[in-house]
Amino acid sequence: MMVMLRLLLRWCLICLLVSISNISNISALHHDYNTRSSLRSSSTKLLSSSRRSHPHHHHQYQQSNHSPPPLKVALIGAGLLAAGSHAPVLQQLEQNVRCVAVWSRNFENAASLASQMNGAMPTDSFEEILKSPHIDALILSTPIDVQSDMVLQALQAGKHVLSEKPLAVSMDQAHALMEEYEAAFEDDLVWNVAGDYKYASAVRFSHKAMEEIGKPFLVSLKVRAPFLKSSHYSEAMWRNQPDWYGGMIVEAFVHASSMLQRLFGSPLCVSAHTSSQTPHIPSLDTMTAQVTWDREIQGTVSVTYASTQNEFELEVIGSQGRMVLKRLYEGNPSNGNSAGGSGGSGNGFYRLSVENASDRYHQDIPFGGLDSDILAFSDSIQYGNHVPRFNTPQDALQDLELVDACLESGKLNGARILLPPDMDPIHQKNYGGRNEPPITVDHLSEDMAEEMSPWATTKSNSQQQYQPRGVDRYGHLDDGRTKWHGKERLT
């Protein structure tokens, strides 16, 4: 009898526990349903808990034997780039970087992308993103004409930032942003500028392969990237009606510029011609340029975004061999889904070929780079100066300087533009470092710009008269028309 009573009591206890568990599960499901049905309000509540005691919250991470918790980021933007590149990479990196929020001006777009991000909350309030204590950093995937303002707002709110290339839409804007970052935020906050080529395996292998071809002396870069009228990438209003000079050249060629800087360093001078070849891209879309890196490395760049076919090829000739990096496409190579330089999207791979006196081989390398960009960004925040950085704002500024120098040369019918990198005394001597004040192209009148063209006849001008000086000892046209490029000019 006692045994049966104990069994009955035990059965009652089990039933009671099961009932409590079911009630808890039903309550959780009901809460989840209510959360999903009122997604906008719940996400706003989650994101808007303000940091009253620390309005400029700076995270301090210490490197230890244990892996730090995942960096909590907000993905800013829900367009083609965010959905096609950033979101998939963030999903792969959840153990290191966790996307907790997605912002878009269109809440439905934010909600749609957030639903793929394992619990990320959508919002259309950028202010709530900035105020949220649950967000460590922002990853920007926004149009480049609004990006600079967002970078500054994020830094002012105490957020780390990973923005897209280019750094800004003009050199003046880039310098102003850089100066503010260096003065007020650089010691506490990490700001990286994503440049897939800085970390792409194809570029790293190419850099290593150049050791096998001796001293490089001739470079040829060919980029053909279709932005067809039928492509989704051509429909964006900010791309159809750019409010900055250079249009597609600024937006897309900056990726290739990043690669050239990574492999060969900062150029010393460029001479370029630019044009617009297709009506549905109302900006410059085609460019050829001669680029000189030092006394022993020179090359040509040929790029167009008005092509109907996709093609990318970098050839480097060295004293002991030749290296070629070629992008090969799978499926339809002319679908217009490439920016012609980022290397982080599309189907296909790179083929790196090396030839020298003793060896000839090639290796296939998958596309990629954005994953390494995001991991490097996270590590820079988590571990500070222990992590090398190749995509700092200073690096991005140099990338943009090359693009802007090409555009300035194009305005002047191919006039030679000298860039102002950290030139050593030999380069200053060889490339015309003079004592007279340098000419600032940005403030020239159209008449002055015209007469500074190498093919223009010499004119008199009320401000200055340019007289031909012949050819200098290094074989360069020394006509007094050479201009220093950039804000910091050599004197």
Image (spheres, rainbow, N blue to C red):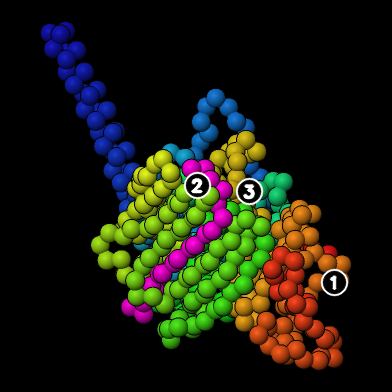
Q: Which amino acid does label 1 sit on?
A: Pro
Residue 221 is inside the magenta segment = yes
* Image coordinates for residue 39, horizontal then vertical, percent: 40, 58
Depicted 437 relative to depicted 351: above or below? below
Residue 320, labelled with which disc?
A: 2
**Disc 3 on helix, strand or loop?**
loop
> To which residue does mark 1 refer?
437
**Secondary structure beneath label 1:** loop
**Tag count:** 3
Q: Is residue 330 in view?
A: yes
Q: Are marks 2 and 3 in contact (CB under 8 Å)?
A: no
- In depth, the one of 416 and 278 nearer the eye is 416
Highlighted range, magenta: 211-233
Name the residue at 80% across, 64% down: 433
Q: Position of residue 355 (x, y in %)?
A: 41, 48
Q: How far apart are marks 2 and 3 (CA)?
A: 41 Å
Q: Which of marks 3 and 1 is nearer the N terminus?
A: 3
Residue, far top: 2
Q: What numbered label is drawn on residue 190?
A: 3
